[in-house]
Image (cartoon, rainbow, N blue to C red):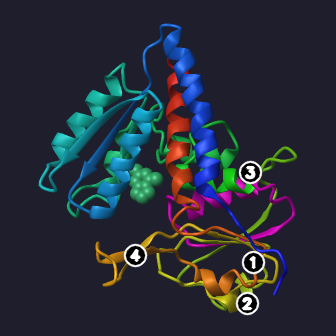
């Protein structure tokens, strides 16, 4: 067991970032500019998505941005969503458009995401922006992987030359994060890592994760990463947010990550908790992307 275990405080890092954004937005508004605007579309009743979207609205307004919310029934048609996205693409008050995924069955998620103007794609999901990311060109970076990079930077975690192992190959986290961390970068900026992406078909997973200097779990399986999968002194980043039943709580569930924190923290030099690790960073990066879009438009 190593002597110094340090927990990464994503709440603190995100609050500092939001404070900076708030001051910048206040300055813009007091100089007579319009407010930046973010439109969020939620379809269906998934409770976790509803919580996430509610939090976005609150943070948006606390920064002085305009929040345009569209909470739609799961029975909405694809044509209605197409019309809404086209309207928002043309709305001069809207700088960012976010379509919360996953969408209910029957709706073509890829088609709808691709319809969002890549200039307002603050999620970084549009093929143009994914392509730019891969090429190392300036673009909107997807919020969760961007938040992971900012946390590594805030805690001065060196990534250059290090072995980063990502468990999970999703379009939202695993794939874009691997592109960000493998990218050539300036000293002090995350990048220049040797990245291994593992997934459900990976053989000898434990042998691979035990070689990780930085281990990132993003598979959506509660408590998947155990102590024996972690190298002594590794940095462990837990992207998972899973609801598991807990009768002792009034709401009936608790949130756990993809990492078994108690075990992994015996090996890790630095580790993110759930909640309070990566989660708050995702929203902060969304706000940063929305301001970036606004600044390219005013
Ligand atoms: N669902 C889970 N995470 C995200 C995200 O970052 N953006 C969108 N649009 N949907 C999500």
Position of residue 165 measured from the top left corner of the image (x, y, whole percent): 70, 73
> Dividing the image into four equal quarters, which quarter contains ligand 1?
bottom left
Q: Is residue 189 above or below residue 152?
A: above
In the rendered structure, which segment of residues is drawn in magenta? 153-182
- Picture disc at residue 268: 1
Label 2 belongs to which residue? 207
| Residue drawn at point x = 14 percent, y = 49 percent | 76
Q: Mark 2 falls on what kind of element? A: helix
Whole-angstrom CA distance, mark 3 to mark 2, is 29 Å
Is 208 on the left-hand or right-hand side of 73?
Answer: right
Nearest-to-viewer mark from 3 and 4: 4
Whole-angstrom CA distance, mark 4 to mark 1, is 23 Å
Whole-angstrom CA distance, mark 2 to mark 1, is 17 Å
Q: Which badge, 3 or 2, is on the more N-terminal residue?
A: 3
Q: Does the beta carbon at disc 1 come under 8 Å from ligand 1?
A: no
163 in the magenta segment: yes
Whole-angstrom CA distance, mark 3 to mark 4, is 28 Å
Is 83 on the left-hand or right-hand side of 268?
Answer: left
Q: Mark 3 falls on what kind of element? A: helix
Viewer can see residue 244: yes
For this rendering, which residue is in front, 107 or 155? 155
Is 101 on the left-hand or right-hand side of 288?
Answer: left
């Amino acid at each position: 067991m190593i002597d110094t275990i340090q927990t990464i405080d994503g709440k603190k890092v995100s609050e500092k970032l939001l404070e900076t954004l708030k001051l910048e937005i206040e300055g813009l508004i007091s100089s007579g500019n319009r407010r930046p605007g973010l439109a969020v579309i939620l379809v269906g009743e998934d409770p976790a998505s509803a919580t996430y979207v509610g939090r976005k609205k609150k943070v948006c307004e606390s920064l002085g941005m305009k929040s345009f919310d569209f909470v739609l029934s799961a029975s909405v048609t694809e044509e209605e969503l197409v019309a809404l996205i086209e309207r928002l693409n043309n709305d001069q008050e809207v700088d960012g458009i976010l379509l919360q995924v996953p969408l209910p069955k029957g709706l073509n998620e890829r088609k709808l995401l691709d319809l969002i103007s890549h200039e307002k794609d603050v999620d970084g999901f549009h093929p143009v922006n994914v392509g730019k990311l891969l090429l190392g060109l300036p673009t909107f970076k997807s919020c969760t992987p961007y938040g992971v990079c900012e946390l590594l930077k805030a805690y001065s975690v060196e990534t250059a030359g290090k072995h980063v192992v990502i468990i999970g190959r999703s379009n939202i986290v695993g794939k874009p994060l691997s592109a960000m961390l493998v990218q050539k970068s300036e000293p002090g900026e995350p990048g220049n890592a040797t990245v291994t992406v593992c997934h459900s078909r990976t053989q000898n997973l434990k042998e691979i994760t035990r070689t990780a200097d930085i281990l990132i779990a993003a598979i959506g399986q509660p408590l998947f990463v155990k102590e024996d999968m972690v190298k002594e002194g590794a940095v462990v980043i837990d992207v998972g947010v899973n609801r598991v039943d807990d009768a002792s709580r009034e709401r009936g569930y608790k949130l756990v990550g993809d990492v078994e924190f108690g075990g992994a923290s015996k090996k890790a030099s630095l580790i993110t908790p759930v909640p309070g690790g990566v989660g708050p960073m995702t929203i902060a990066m969304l706000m940063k992307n929305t301001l970036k879009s606004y600044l390219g438009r005013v």
